[in-house]
Amino acid sequence: MNDYILETENLGLRYGAFAALGSVDLKIKRGSIHTVIGPNGAGKTTLFHCLTGERKPSSGSIQFAGHDVTHQAPHKRVAVGMSRSFQITSLFQNLSVRENLRLAAQGRDGLAALAFWYSENHRRQHSDKADEVIERIKLGAVADTYAGELSHGQQRVLEVGMALCSSPQMLLLDEPTSGMGVDDIPVMTQLISELGQDHTVMLIEHNMKLVMSISDRITVMHQGNILIEGEPEVVSGDERVKKAYLGESGS
């Protein structure tokens, strides 16, 4: 089996003369936590969009778990084991935590999820998956609470849970701590660290304390290209990174 679950080669996305992504060669090792950092406009979210099928690249290729997914639709990528959470919270606000997760589990079936003739046993599988994930993300105390009534931190955790419901090989998390208060960030940090024991996790994140504490490998992007990539110690010690992203002290 290939050590790398995801590989891109010369991945680029252009809008006319503007290169949102230049030529990105990326390798994500199975079972690792791999973080992408960089300033606004560096191409991080554009890279995620291309990897998950939200955008069609102008050039290059994407290999995931032995499949060429370069031109596959997002739901096809979910079917082969890729799942994503978004920077902006997108939950069913008037449904409970459990129902949000059950629907996320059902969504893995694609259009078949709409089939009214599903057996009760098949539907129970979705409910069982929801209960399994509730325990995993430690939201059992609010399982029957409407998503809209949760704290922002709990909503972010629920979103990660919804991504888990498709039983992915790889989780892509777009700024999972976005908008979180300082008290909620350790909860998310612990969750991502635990998920990294069973899944490959790739995330975009601005919180450098979190990034340096849980990442196996870090990719720094700048103007649509990779500036440097390596282990946290290597990246935090790079003068260009310290000056541009971490401050002169590297903290």
Image: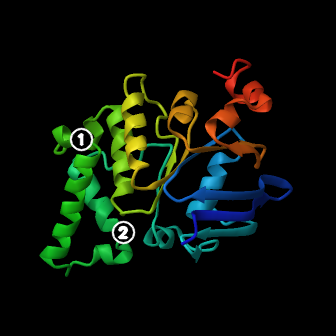
Decide: is 3 above or below 141.
below
Residue at x 34% of width, y 66% of height: 107
Measured as percent of width and height from the top left, residue 6 is found at: 59, 63
Q: Secondary structure at mark 1?
A: loop
Q: Which residue is mark 2?
A: 108
Sequence-wise, the earlier of marks 2 and 1 is 2
Residue at the outermost top position: 249
Specify the label residue 139 is tagged with.
1
Looking at the rendering, which quadrant does residue 24 occupy? bottom right
Residue at the outermost bottom position: 117
- Does the residue at mark 2 contact the one at mark 1 (Cβ under 8 Å)? no
Left or right: 195, with 22 as reference point: left
* Image quadrant where one finds the C terminus: top right
Left or right: 154, with 68 as reference point: left
Q: Hey, what amino acid is under mark 2?
A: Arg
Q: Hey, what amino acid is under mark 1?
A: Leu
Residue at x 43% of width, y 35% of height: 189
